[in-house]
Image (spheres, rainbow, N blue to C red):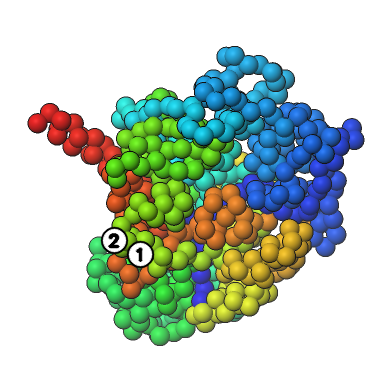
Amino acid sequence: MNSRHGSTAMVLCPTAFLVSSVVLLACDGNGGAPRDAGVEGGPVDGITGATPGVTTAALSELHSGYGNADCGGCHGSVHLDGFTGAQCVTCHGTNGAPVRPPDHPDGDCASCHNSHPELAFASPNDCRGCHRYATVATCSPVETYDAVVVGAGAGGLAAASVLSRRGLNVAVLEQHHQVGGCMTNFIRGDYRFEASLHAYDGWGLSTLDALGIGDEVEVVRGPVMYRLAYPNLLLDVPADKTAYRNLLKTEFPHEAAHIDALFDGMTFTNIPAYAGMSLIEAIASHGIEDEKLIAVLTVLAGFLSATPDALPAESFIGMWDAYHSMGYHYFVGGSQAIVDALEQSIEQAGGTIKLHTRAAKIRIENDRVVGVETTDQACYDAPFVISNASLPVTYNELVGPEHLPAEAVTELAARTPASSSIAMIYLGVNRDYTGAFGGTHEIFVNTSFAVGADHAAAVRCLPEEVSYVISNYSVVDPTTAPPGKNVIVLTVDFMDYQCANQWRWGESYAAYNEYKRQLADILIRRAETHLPQLSEHIEVMEIGSPRTIEQYTLNPQGSWAGFAFAPELDPVHTGTIETPIEGLYVCGAWIGGAGQSVALGTGARAAGAVLANRREGTNASNR
């Protein structure tokens, strides 16, 4: 199988990925972390090994700086200036900051407190990260809103933006120190890295327009979508659909008539004709038999986190036609540009975004939602709640099976997370490789034409054999790195969540670090076939795994694509924004499937359902 991770926008999350484990010691006056030996002995700046969920990373009284808010005073370069001091709490805990008493307002801290003026913390979100509420038996404090959104990923931000701009008083609760979920960039030294987006489909641009932010982002679109590198075959896939058809007919003349039939048939308007077919079956229905051609045509199946023989043709065709008919796009500033525009629209419309605020329970009375309670017993009352948390977390943890009909519990139990078989190696390099990409920003490197080859390699955890993508984001967005430098990302196919005892996470955190580094070394050496001497030019390296996604998004098994396809199921309760609980709606990849534009669309639909429900309630009260 030849596949790529992405969908309308592939998803993997950022932040403190591991290169080396740097222990937080007492400040020695030099500041920062030591240099770490790089790939093949090259110089790579060391990044700390802190990640949420690692108990050894949490600070205690034994830390010499315990109670000191100026983390950067001793550790300013540990993350190459990619983090502010107030964000350290995500991995290292509150560092002894005093708790807030019950009923203490959760508003503008700076108006009453200015205890860290030299650190320029942003009030109230940065303050909230360190100064948690003292836990009490009942809700304290209590705030009231028209609607509460749980999770500030793509769907949650879209929902909050729509509702805020329609005049509703909305609160967004996000457990992380930043919004966006997997739609983010992160900075390390000279480099700004895209966490997830490979390309955005043309159809999705209309979603941005509908959200009122289409003019707030700068779209980039080139003549070449991507370069395919197979054994003895190199193809630059044109963005123009007619040009792509002609290229394939030139490369595979014996399949020319079948190629025409496929391009004429596999269109968005003709999707119903492929109902019940897998992608492989759909291609075979047009008489195509050449193994190499099938591999080329199905290369984007991984964008939906599925193999071509398991992926429903209907799902693939919509994405494939949207890309080839309406464009394969990127944005200046990456997916962060979309997030920034949505965040700004929420705040300008009077909405409230609360970071470092993790939902613990969606409160329900008489089968109707009444609000959300957080992990520190703050309560946010509202007649409507939209959950952008994963559906398993929403139903099993935040709602509780006791509030669900038996058939919903059974259906949820029958569904499994989509494969999160992905690793990403983020590289900041001091060499310009743009000329090696032939006018595109991505090279898809495939080891075999055989369907299923990647999956077989993944099951055995063989990084030497899996396919991977080389992305050079500096091609489409020169602002990612200084002139002469590039941001290179290696996206690895099908290195499963369970690989090597969950990437040796179950063995020890140090073993997990070392295993990731070993995999990175292998992939970097393989990439040197296309980018000569790559290992000698690395200045910054970060490595993400399925564990990374799980830790930062709380998605089960780190699934960035939601549920696995289950054609045998009729997803009555797990494939819709509606829930069995009055006033509760859900959104995100676990409802609509993989892809940023898809997740944004589910958020907009959930917001629309809230507005419709409010109108119906108003009309009923007037009758």
Apparent side of residue 207 relative to residue 514 in the rendered image (left or right): left
Q: Badge 2 is on which residue?
A: 572
* x and y, in percent, of residue 560 in the image: 50, 57
Point out residue 554 in the picture as x, y percentages from the top left corner.
Answer: 54, 51
Q: Residue 170 carries which label?
A: none
Whether residue 157 is visible here, answered yes or no, is no
Q: Name the residue located 47 percent from the left edge and 63 percent from the top edge.
A: 417
Q: Where's residue 210, x and y in %? A: 32, 40
- Which amino acid, mark 2? Val
Q: Say which amino acid is labelled 1.
A: Glu
Viewer-closest of 100 and 393: 100
User: Along the horizontal axis of the image, is 246 left or right of 89?
Assistant: left
Secondary structure type for disc 1: helix
Mark sitting earlier along the chain (1/2): 1
Q: Tell me residue 188's x, y (percent).
A: 70, 43
Disc 1 marks which residue? 411
Residue sitting farthest toward the top: 112
Question: Are the residues at dot 1 and dot 2 in contact (C-beta closer than 8 Å)?
Answer: yes
Q: Nearer the viewer, residue 597 or 62?
A: 62
Q: Could you tell me which residue is drawn at 24 percent across and 35 percent down?
A: 614
Task: Identify the residue at image location x=33%, y=41%.
Answer: 365
Distance from Cα at disc 1 to Cα at disc 2? 8 Å
